[in-house]
Amino acid sequence: MKNKTLKNGFSIPLLGLGTWGFGGREFHDPENNDVRQIEAIENAMTSGITWIDTAEYYADGYAETLVGTALKGAKRDSYQLCSKVWKNHLRRDDVWRAAENSLNRLKTDHFDLYLYHQIDESVPLEETLNAMNELVQQKIAEYIGVSNFNTKRLERAMQISEAPIVVNQVEYSLVCREPEKELLPFCQENDVILQAWRPLQYLKNCPLTDRLCEKYSISLQQLAIAWLVAQNSVTTISASQNWNHQWDNISAVNLQLDGDDIELLRREYPDQREISRVPLK
Ligand SMILES: NC(=O)c1ccc[n+]([C@@H]2O[C@H](COP(=O)([O-])OP(=O)(O)OC[C@H]3O[C@@H](n4cnc5c(N)ncnc54)[C@H](OP(=O)(O)O)[C@@H]3O)[C@@H](O)[C@H]2O)c1
């Protein structure tokens, strides 16, 4: 898997495996098919998707439990883990507790990346970021980043944090264009990875995508992934429990779309949405 690398040395694969929906959604689903999802994580690793994106929020921690189970026998340097602190844990001691609980569920001693998941303005940004910096100092998190931050808040976070903010994970896809106006150019100019969440849901075929899928002999989902990662500073994560889809998604990050086609899709993909499902704050 190809990576994008920042000037400070942080390096991240173009595609990672998302785990939203693994183990349940907001809550653990006791009827969940754990075996299928553990296999999906193991298959992803076998196929070459070694970056796993999870969060304490997903299935109330159970997604992390499944990730920990799937990766139990794997060498720690053969995969990279990103987890996130939820908005009810942004106070200093809560950040520490949340991180420790996540690590226990993931059965590891460090995160490759730890993200501030969603904003709660009642907690000063300084307090949360200082706690996250402590995690870096204690080698609990190798790198830290944020999610769903608008440009202004990202800039403030970068000023506050001693450790570099290496990622802002936001909704970005052919459908959702909120980051395009301001945030993406800012990330490109300031050496921050914009990691696109939900790259595939809500996609629709149209004459333009039909033509391009035929031209490159790829699916609509592959076109959507190739379009995202063709852009400077953009990587993505997708949740797939299907091995064939995982292979398709891997081959999509190696595709080279023509520049004209990238611009056509940017301008003419229909029904573009201006505002993210989790609006940038
Ligand atoms: N930071 C945040 O606030 C935030 C918010 C939302 C999501 N996220 C993260 O982003 C990740 C990705 O977003 P998401 O899971 O919501 O949506 P997604 O990855 O855009 O879509 C997942 C769906 O796409 C299908 N799919 C994947 N590859 C496919 C392919 N090649 N062909 C056809 N279908 C394909 C999957 O089905 P199969 O299983 O059948 O392949 C699944 O139903 C999440 O899992 C989570 O880790 C972060």
Image (tube, rainbow, N blue to C red):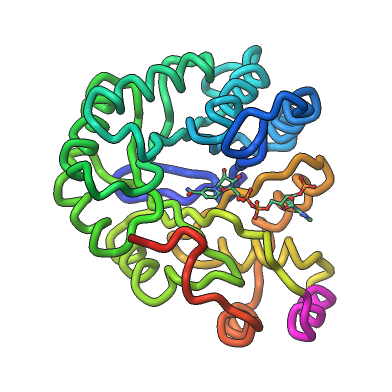
Q: Nearer the viewer, residue 244 or 251?
A: 244
Q: Nearer the viewer, residue 174 or 278?
A: 278
Main SS, magenta region, reads helix
Residue at image position (48%, 14%) is 104
- Residue 144 visible here: yes
Residue at image position (48%, 53%) is 195
The span shown in magenta is 205-215
Quarter of the image that includes the C terminus: bottom left
Residue at image position (70%, 49%) is 250
Residue 39 percent location from the top left of the image:
77, 27
Report whether 45 appears left or right of 178. right
Residue at image position (65%, 67%) is 256
On screen, 215 above or below 82?
below
Q: Is residue 209 magenta?
A: yes
Q: Nearer the viewer, residue 11 or 56?
A: 56
On screen, 135 above or below 84?
above
* Quarter assignment of residue 98: top left
Residue 64 percent location from the top left of the image:
56, 26
Q: Is residue 30 magenta?
A: no
Residue 62 percent location from the top left of the image:
59, 25
On screen, 105 above or below 254?
above
Q: Nearer the viewer, residue 110 or 230?
A: 110
Quarter of the image that includes the N terminus: top right
